Image (cartoon, grey):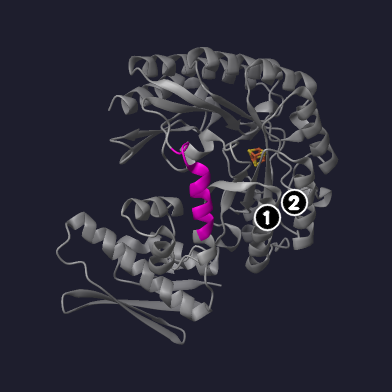
Amino acid sequence: MTIRVFTPETGFVQDMADVLRLFYGGAPIFFNEEGEADLRVEHAVSRQNGRWCDQFTGGPVSVFHLQGADGAGELEQKRLRKRAVKLALYEYCKKLTGVHPPWGSLTGIRPSRLYYEALEEGLDPVRALVDVFDVTEDRARLLDEMHEMQAGVRTPPEGAFDIYIGIPFCKTRCAYCSFSSGEIGDGHLVAPYVQALKREIALSAQIVAEKGLRARALYVGGGTPTAIPHEALEEIIFAAREAFPGAVEQTVEAGRPDTIDRPMLEMLLRAGTTRISVNPQTFNDETLRRIGRAHTARETIAAYQLARAAGFTDINMDLIAALPGETLEDFRRTLETTVSLAPESVTVHALAIKRSSRLHEQMHVQGGGHGLTPASEAEQMTALARRTLAAGGWKPYYLYRQKYMAGNLENVGYARPGMACLYNIGNMEETASVLALGAGAITKWLFDRARRIERAPNVKNIEAYIERVEEMAARKRALIFS
Ligand code: SF4
């Protein structure tokens, strides 16, 4: 399906595209360009009694939206205009399609941010989300439950920051992957990467020491950190612990079960790891093969049991709802197996097919359908996860949304009470500064009591990172001292 929109508001075309995607997924969208179209939308803007009027017309539907923004400053005026244009287009699409997206008109903003803003303003946050943004009652209640789990751990103490270390290697590339990780291949980049990372760790430690800051949580992610030899990973973790002492939480993503063995687990415990992730994604072997994960469900269970036997008391499992070819029954079986293993936390992702993934290429470039799950079934899967996990004692503690997610759903981290991951909360809620090290890692620093957030990205390419590591540290210094 091709969509063409004709609008005088050229400054908001990205925002309009985000709204259209809520209803039409990855359909090509063109702005102010004539050509063949399955849906042609005309946007007219006028002024009536000092108020802006947006009218969207096309197909059998026309929506007329009035909004006053006079008297506000220029920036505020722009913000209100953008919101009005998006809401008018949202109403138009909803009327045209009869679809009510779970998160209503929200795009490009964390739902929990609006929840907490409403709370600070003394409003009922559930009502505010439902009434203003058309969020479904069910999703607004999800935020309410999450709020309970975040009580007391949402914000780190004054002067504390979190650390992210990226290991951008994987054994094979998953079909849905959009991360900047590379297949490990013959491993020739691992040793120079470890050296570069240790250099960045040392330089960054000087920066935070000069600022008198202290570490709260350390998170080693990727890629798959355990894809590299355990001796190499040990060097990195020990260097980080020495450089940033005092972290109360240390997570290592041991994501792929086929990278987990006894020496690796023993090293992780020796290195002070308090939490690991063993990620099934699904317990269906056929799906695992289809999405390019080079392991079986049985191997996931074995890796999990090995981690338990080694002494890990905080294990997370990641699942993905709406994987290609999976039915609600497949997903139910995956949930049942997960519950029977009883990890401390479970993160339920809704499949997101991003442009840089192989799945996107297969679907859009090669034209394959690949059994994508309909939005309604994807929603049933995440609802089932919520019910099943609630019945087993897991509660939602953080959530985030991404573009191109199946059914416009969300990723939700569930945990047993008291087992919420501090790093995940601080990072997703943007309540903690994150010092990020490694290729493609993005340092995110909070200023002025989190009212201003600035970022310093590292280069994604592994070779470029190795060559330019001093520059990456200099970027961080400029940011943190700005
Ligand atoms: S394990 Fe994660 S980072 Fe690695 S290829 Fe799969 S999705 Fe990408």
Quarter of the image for the N terminus: give it: bottom right
SS of the residue at dot 2? helix
Indicate which quadrant contains ligand 1.
top right
Determine which quarter of the picture holds residue 75.
Answer: bottom left
Checking the image for residue 385, the label placed there is 1
Name which residue type carries label 1: Ala
On screen, residue 75 versus residue 347, left or right, reads left
The percent position of residue 261, horizontal first and vertical second, equals 79, 25
The percent position of residue 408, horizontal first and vertical second, equals 55, 61
**Residue on which disc 2 sits:** 335
Q: Nearer the viewer, residue 245 or 77?
A: 245
Q: Residue furthest right?
A: 298
Can residue 323 be found in the magenta stretch? no
Q: Are marks 1 and 2 in contact (CB under 8 Å)?
A: yes
Q: From mark 1 to mark 2, how far is it between C-alphas? A: 7 Å
On screen, residue 305 versus residue 413, left or right, reads right
On screen, residue 145 versus residue 227, left or right, reads left
Name which residue type carries label 2: Leu
- Relative height, residue 318 to residue 95 (above, below): above
- Relative height, residue 40 to residue 309 (above, below): below
- Relative height, residue 112 to residue 135 (above, below): above
Q: Residues within 10 Å of mark 2 (few under 14, many from 20)?
A: many
Checking the image for residue 479, the label placed there is none
In the image, the residue with mark 2 has its CB under 8 Å from the nearest atom of ligand 1: no
Visible residue check, residue 402: no
Chain part drawn in magenta: 141-154
- Relative height, residue 25 to residue 108 (above, below): below
The percent position of residue 189, horizontal first and vertical second, equals 62, 22
Quarter of the image for the C terminus: give it: top left
Q: Nearer the viewer, residue 23 or 218?
A: 218
